[in-house]
Image (tube, rainbow, N blue to C red):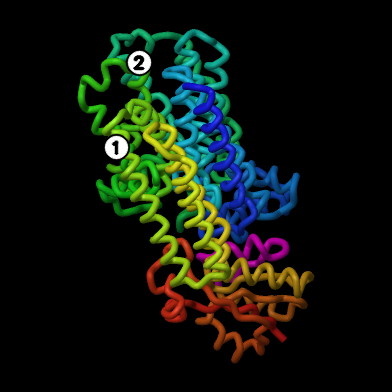
Amino acid sequence: MNLKDQLLYKILLVLIVAVSALALFGGIMEPDSALYASIAKNMVLRNDYINIYVRGADWLDKPHLTFWFAAMSFKLFGVTAFAYKLPSFLFGLLGACYIYKLAKDIYNKEIGLISSLIFLSSLHVLISTFDVRAEVYITTFTFAAIYHYYKAHQGSFWHIVAGSLFAACAIMIKGIFVLIPVFGGFIIYWLSTNQWKQLLKPKWWLAIVLIFIFIIPELYTLYVQFDLHPEKIVFGKTHVSGLKFFFWDSQFGRFFNNGPIKGKGDISFFLHTTLWAFLPWSILFYTAVFNLFKRENRINLPSESIFIWVSAAITFLLFSLSKFQLPHYILIILPQFAIITAIYIQKLKDRSLKIFITIQNVLAILVILILSSIAVFFKFDYNYIALVILVGLLIISFIFFKGLSTRILLARSIFISIGMMIFLSGFFYPSVLKYEAGMEAGNWLKKNYPKAKASVLMYPDTYSFDFYANGEPKYFWSYEELTKVKNKEDLIIYTPEAELARLQTEYHTEVLKSFEYYHITKLTGKFINAKTRPQVLEHFYLVKIH
């Protein structure tokens, strides 16, 4: 790699990080992000970092570490959307650093830089910077563990400790299944290269012991909140073990679909999810995978490539066979996808390179046409400025990057991602979030009734109000509960339209403000089209009891 290419790749990295940072200044999306943010907010308000509560009730689903990171950020920067998103953003950058380090060590510096670029510019990583859940943390921790165990395989003891710490962090984000992508690739690599004696080496057994030592904080909190209190009602029953849920129900229970949380699986789900989640690289990635099936294309690759391929393959297969499938799961193996794609891109020459530059050019035009159509039909603020920026970026990429080379292919592809991120974070998401009624209501209430005692009546699925309203809103599961406190001064209720008539007739309420609502993570054509949008909108209200 010459200095000119190296400089270009670093400039592109800076650009993609800069436009990704725009997401830090947007709102928090429902349902999961708002739920997680409200949990962390409750931890800070209660000064209780052991028990997880949602609307006053014990909550058992995800481990604690995601919430601890957010709570620590709230302590430093205040309870804001920016503070919630910042740790995930920083850990995403750390993940890109580990991708670079591993790809550089196994292959070369150029593949390392290209891999980091591909990862940071893939669509689902960009989306996850705005809609922050737990997956960016898991992605970084699992891949960091893989890197350190790779270095430990080469003989460094302290990498065993570092790898085990990162693996433990991944477990305390999602659960025990993350050990499959971490260790699965190594085990198959050792067996396929006749290094099976590695399985007997004390350092790997020490790694397992260290992992279990490092996850003790999570085990302790689960034991204190649930196992010590069999009388608590969780999932509609008593005698629920937090430890059993952590080790079995939340992981294998979902895979076999016999746990308390069930889903419906489709074996092809992640095949078509990857097509959009890994844009603008998905066509190159699928071609790279097919290319690896030919033996002559694998001969000159380092044998360590096996654990990268296998780590991705077994995790992808596990997800595909599971009955519980969500699109953001694919994020966990995008680092491996990025490296596989980078290896293939570096090898492209002449006719193949020309074909893929043409494909990426067509893709860029299609993306701009799709986003432009959304801008026109949605009619969000400054939509024509968004169109000018999109077209301008396309023109810049064609003017400044001409010729037939790897860097032309990469630069034009990165500009697709830059355009998508500016469109999403700068224009689309801010407009869509106006229909997140809970956020709008919480902000309005905080501004106009700062001393109000906020509450929610009869609507369990919206959590943005819980985060944006002052304090920890009280939740009323029934009208009997509301009746007991209806004379409380400054009580203001957030409720759906279905409850409004009863409140007005039985409780003498005053409507303070109405808000339009749509489930914004499930976009449809009717919602995107401004003309048909009123047909799919619901309404929520802030009401005050007199």
252 vs 33: above or below: above
Determine the residue positioned at 55% across, 52% down.
130
377 vs 199: above or below: below
Tell whether position 476 is magenta. yes
Query: Which mark is drawn over residue 469?
Result: none
Determine the residue positioned at 42% across, 39% down.
402
* Magenta highlight range: 460-477
Distance CA(mark 2)–CA(mark 1): 24 Å
In the image, is 539 to the left or to the right of 185? right
Q: Using the rendered view, name the quadrant where residue 289 is placed.
A: top left
Q: Are marks 2 and 1 in contact (CB under 8 Å)?
A: no
Type of amino acid under label 2: Pro
Determine the residue positioned at 47% across, 51% down.
395
- Circle 1 sits on which residue? 317
Q: Position of residue 477 (x, y in %)?
A: 56, 70
Between tags 2 and 1, which lies in front?
Answer: 2
Furthest residue toward bottom: 505
Residue 378 visible in image: yes
Residue 231 visible in image: no
Give the SS element for disc 1. helix
- Circle 2 sits on which residue? 302
